[in-house]
Image (spheres, helix red, strand yellow):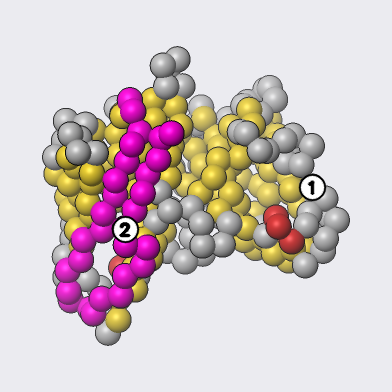
Amino acid sequence: KNQVEQSPQSLIILEGKNCTLQCNYTVSPFSNLRWYKQDTGRGPVSLTIMTFSENTKSNGRYTATLDADTKQSSLHITASQLSDSASYICVVWDEGRDSSYKLIFGSGTRLLVRP
Amino acid sequence: SAVISQKPSRDICQRGTSLTIQCQVDSQVTMMFWYRQQPGQSLTLIATANQGSEATYESGFVIDKFPISRPNLTFSTLTVSNMSPEDSSIYLCSVQRGSSYNEQFFGPGTRLTVL
């Protein structure tokens, strides 16, 4: 069964510190992997999109890595800010044999940045 | 990107009633989707809203409970019928805009509470 698992489930860090969120997936065939940020009461917003051939992609203070061999991805947040407090969702694009597709969502990591 | 608006942003409803949620996109899109996000959970796809034809529902979701309309390429509605407290969730509209990565965007969501 295609799955996306994230860890930790929740995380509390102090403002200015770095943190790394993990995502493991079993989706195959794999098309691409996305990290979304979801603020409370808002819809998810895309941070990065990575194909199987990409190892690293950055978006400001967010850096995503992908290891397609081990089926692992991470999202590293540098110099955290209070506004980084949100849920971070790992989403894998499952491309079916008939060219149909589905987004497989992880359960998310809830990050709280404290002053 | 795509600008997506949803109405209402939130509502509190009585058991047994129905609520229609509207989704408006700032430009024509091919694919529109409706998701549900239950408290503390990740997103679950309800259905794909097809322009000019019946929506395609995922396993566990039926048209009688979640009728969907999509009269054109920029607008869709989702109705939650005969509501019960278990329907309390955030309902999100999502669209796909074609590109090399087939980017997917989400609306701000409608927070529904059923008493």
Q: Is residue B27 above or below residue B54?
A: below
Q: Secondary structure at mark 2?
A: strand
Compared with A82, B26 (above or below) is above
The residue range painted magenta reads A1-29
- Magenta span contains residue B101: no
Amino acid type at mark 2: Ser
The residue tagged 2 is: A7
Choose top left, top right, bottom left or bottom right for residue A18.
bottom left
Tell me what residue is drawn at x 74 percent, y 61 percent. Answer: B85
Tag 1 subunit: B
* Residue depth check, mark 1 versus mark 2: number of the one nearer the observer: 2
In this view, the residue in front, A101 or B23, is A101
In the rendered view, does B27 fall on the left or right side of B61?
left
Which mark is on residue B81? 1
Residue at figure coordinates x 19%, y 38% from the top left: A70
Q: Quadrant of the C terminus of chain B?
A: bottom right
Q: Residues within 10 Å of mark 2 (few under 14, many from 20)?
A: some
- Name the foreground residue: A78 vs B77: A78
Residue A11 lies in the magenta stretch:
yes
Residue A95 x, y percent position in the rendering: 39, 25
- Tag count: 2
Compared to residue A78, the image places residue A35 above or below, namely above
> Element at badge 1?
loop
Chain letter, disc 2 residue: A
